Image (cartoon, rainbow, N blue to C red):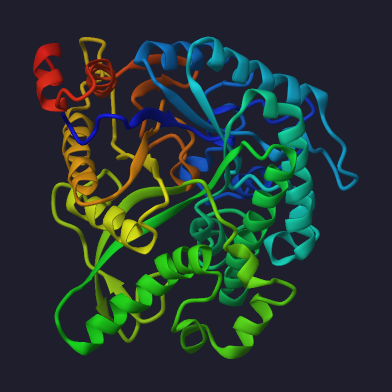
Amino acid sequence: MSNLDGVRWGSATAAYQIEGAVDLGGRVPTIWDVFTAVPGNTTRGDTGAIACQAYEKPEAMLEAIEWLGLETYRFSVAWSRIITGPGGEVNPEGVAYYRRILQELRDRGVAPVVTLYHWDLPQWLQERGGWASLATADAFVHFVRVAAAELGDLVDDWITVNEPFCAAFHGHLSGLHAPGIRDEATALRAALMQLHAHGEAVRALRAVDAGFRVGLAMNLSDLEPASDSPADIAAADRADLVENRLFLHTLLQGRLPDGTVDYFGADAVDAAVDGIDVARIAEPMDFIGINYYEHNVVRAAELGTDLVVRGIEKLPVPEPRSANGVAVRPDGFTRVLLRVAALTPDLPIWVTENGIGLWDYVGPDGTCDDVERVAFIERYLDALETAIAGGAKVEAYYFWALMDNFEWPFGYQLRYGLFYTDYPTGTLMPKASAEAYRAHIARGSTSIDETVRRNGAAA
């Protein structure tokens, strides 16, 4: 029997990245609509205005899910399609769209997992302070209650917030993501405000239905010092504090991790927690979602080049790596899962994202032979099996992404999908990786390399 037996197999997407139709169905503008309208913020000025056309033409997405044989599908509902203004008004067209998607999934025997915040904050909330304001957390809880009441008969599993690190530090410090702010104190406040909103949202969901399963999805990095020098070890620890412990330990332990005040300063920390009861963040969850992409080797640098962590440099990664320079290190994936398991051995782990961005193309034969992604799946599922053998209680795995979509500042250039998206038409075509993942799901514990050989794809 394989250690992967019993894992639910899925894939994932997010609303702004696939839906398009930003002016249709009663949707109101988000911070990403505003951010992408600024020249230079995204590759070639790409926006999510059209994306994969999943709002107007969801059939292609649903057919892809069914073709793959997914057991579960993770997607986000757009806050801006459900709540349309400061009065908390509910948009019936948005509710109807998501009810249709949920019913279609259930009719296909696919268990939906709904993410409530995947970075698309309504712009009207940003104009009132965004994630630096307690009012935004309150507005989020209202949205959560509405979503649960309107959709909860079709949903069992909920993710409150996706990757609060990216929304906080890339949205409010590096400026690479919406809303494009560059201020460390604001980034820290945004980080803790999202965690505060998460804790309150868990309680709100359970007040609607105590049977809901609820968690949060966080991205964790695997980090190692460039040498055994005290300076490099300290640099890696700083990176770990900002990228990992600030979220993982606060979420699980209800207190800020050691070193937070030393790094950010007492005044910044006091301002960040103003009005927030940090202990309430650690509301017990039914699972913890882990998004894994990055392994980084860190060294100290007086004039650090990292856009988020002070005084560090992340060394260039060797081959193999993704098209945008992210290391392919399945051993790092195993370490991250075992780290979480060591902190909370009884809490189920869901791998809510794992994938690789490539410069995919359709060849002269009309196919997309993404052999690098096929090999990636094989290696990372082996690493997943190793983690489970080591004690990680992994219940589900979601490959990112179902189809190529709008990849934030990379626009439409970088492709993560199992399906190749023809953006002008919204047509989806399975890549070699989709064939391999489909065969893995169908055969259960059969190894990916075996399924690839059976399908004639060369890894």
Q: Is residue 346 left or right of residue 451?
A: right
Q: Residue at x 75, y 73 (%)?
A: 275
Residue 75 percent coordinates (x, y): 53, 32
- Residue 425 in view in this figure: no
Quadrant for the N terminus in the image: top left
Above or below, comparing residue 438 to residue 383 in the picture: above
Answer with left or right where residue 121 lies relative to residue 340.
right
Is residue 401 in view from this perspective? yes
Give the residue at x 28% y 37%: 358
Is residue 315 shown left or right of residue 18? left
Name the foreground residue: 140 vs 84. Answer: 140
User: In screen coordinates, is 155 left or right of 337?
Assistant: right
Q: Where's residue 80, x and y in %?
A: 73, 38
Q: Is residue 330 above or below residue 245?
A: above
Q: Spot the residue most to the right.
A: 87
Give residue 413's position: percent from left, percent from top. 39, 36
Q: Position of residue 84 (x, y in %)?
A: 82, 38
Dividing the picture into quadrants, the one containing residue 205 is top right
- Disc tally is 0
Above or below for 130 versus 19: below
Q: Quadrant of the C terminus?
A: top left
Q: Residue at x 42, y 51 (%)?
A: 347
